[in-house]
Amino acid sequence: MSTPRVAVIGSGVAGASTAFALAAGGAEVVVVDRVLRGQATAAGAGIIQPWSSGVDGPTYDLYAAGAAYYPQLLERLAAAGVSDIGYRVTGSLVVHADPARLDDVEERLRRRTAGVAVAGTVERLGERDARALFPPLAPALSAVFVSGGARVDGRRLRSGLLAGARRLGAVVLDAPARLVPASAGSWAVHTPGAEIDADVVVVAAGAWVNSVLEPLGHQLDVEPQRGQIAHLELEGRDTANWPSVLPPSSHYIVSFDAGRIVVGATRETGSGFDARITAGGTLEVLTNALTVAPGLASASLIETRVGLRPLAAEHGPYLGPVPGLPNLFLNAGFGPAGLTMAPVAGHALAQLVLAGSSDLDLSAFAPPGHRLSQ
Ligand SMILES: Cc1cc2nc3c(=O)[nH]c(=O)nc-3n(C[C@H](O)[C@H](O)[C@H](O)COP(=O)(O)OP(=O)(O)OC[C@H]3O[C@@H](n4cnc5c(N)ncnc54)[C@H](O)[C@@H]3O)c2cc1C
């Protein structure tokens, strides 16, 4: 194959990262996405801080590799003329009302960040020092601070990756895609306006991955998990450098420029593809946020977003060739951590497609051979 023609289905962070890396690697790339309601990338909070997480094994390794990859990603995007994706190292506060309950967190953070330059330093903070970093915080909370915690704007990340891919020659189409086998192991991607011939296809369709695979007789254990997340505004406050806040629950707070504070999120397993904002979801998100940070009570509620996380039941994400379907690759199933993991995973997957191997070992994420019964 001289210049491989690669079609990427889906342009959330998974598809956009893969397309950018494929285009940088010299492939002829076409990205197809109909931008469905509930795209996870457009709703993601954007916390890049894997080191305190309870995740272990190869999934943790990918999570940590994802955070470590960001500085390289910024360089690669800058080389393609993209300068701002809303990424900033702000630090991250893991908070708890009982300081003794932070001992394990501190130990885990110290162990995992030792020798990892991008993770920065780990520091134990009393309640006053924690509030000095994040003023709306409840008085009774102490914290462990990890200085390398970062945040990214998922929408700007996606549009930056797609802009970079376009500058490197990729074509981005706004259309629904249907995948059809063509001759000799190649593929045709059908859209209402065009039929795209491809030597290789990467399916990065997020929570919708099975709607692309099932017509080919294949299925994955990936389901949509709804996440509702609220955007608040503290008018006139310079919040750009405020750290993210992680309380003991799965909820969190992350700050952006110009007073924007994002609080979330629900984890609604079993939601199906119902991408509505609900009264109960909004109540849950705001109650959790104001318990941890009562100083946010007077903020304006400016927006609520909703995304369908592509949640893999067991071994996700799935990264690599699909058994029994030549020249078809998957990049899906990132669940709650795709804004961290997908850029490095997309880079590695592009290497796998173009060179047959990748710097990062993806073998733990090899897609299973789940054929649908006839
Ligand atoms: C509320 C919330 C908070 C989150 N917070 C964080 C966080 O703090 N840190 C973190 O690392 N991660 C976070 N995540 C997770 C992260 O956002 C997701 O893991 C990631 O965005 C998934 O990206 P994706 O590209 O796989 O899927 P998506 O972004 O959903 O993209 C899939 C795309 O495929 C397209 N598509 C599907 N089928 C077709 C078809 N047949 N034809 C054409 N196009 C198709 C869809 O239109 C969609 O655009 C959060 C997610 C949510 C919902």
Image (cartoon, rainbow, N blue to C red):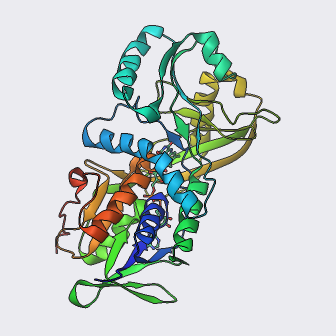
For the question of whether residue 18 can be seen, the reply is yes
Q: Quadrant of the C terminus?
A: bottom left
Residue 24 appears in which quarter of the rendering?
A: bottom left
For the question of whether residue 38 can be seen, the reply is no
Locate residue 275, reporting x and y percent.
53, 56
Residue at image point 69% right, 23% down: 136
Q: Is residue 204 left or right of residue 242?
A: left
Residue at image point 55% right, 61% down: 79
Q: Closest to the observer: 116 or 174? A: 116
Locate residue 170, reporting x and y percent.
50, 76
Q: Quadrant of the N terminus?
A: bottom left
Q: Is residue 374 left or right of residue 188?
A: left
- Above or below 228: residue 185: below
Q: Residue furthest front?
A: 79
Residue at image point 48% right, 28% down: 120
Residue at image point 24% right, 62% down: 357
Locate residue 322, reporting x and y percent.
23, 68
Locate residue 3, reporting x and y percent.
36, 82
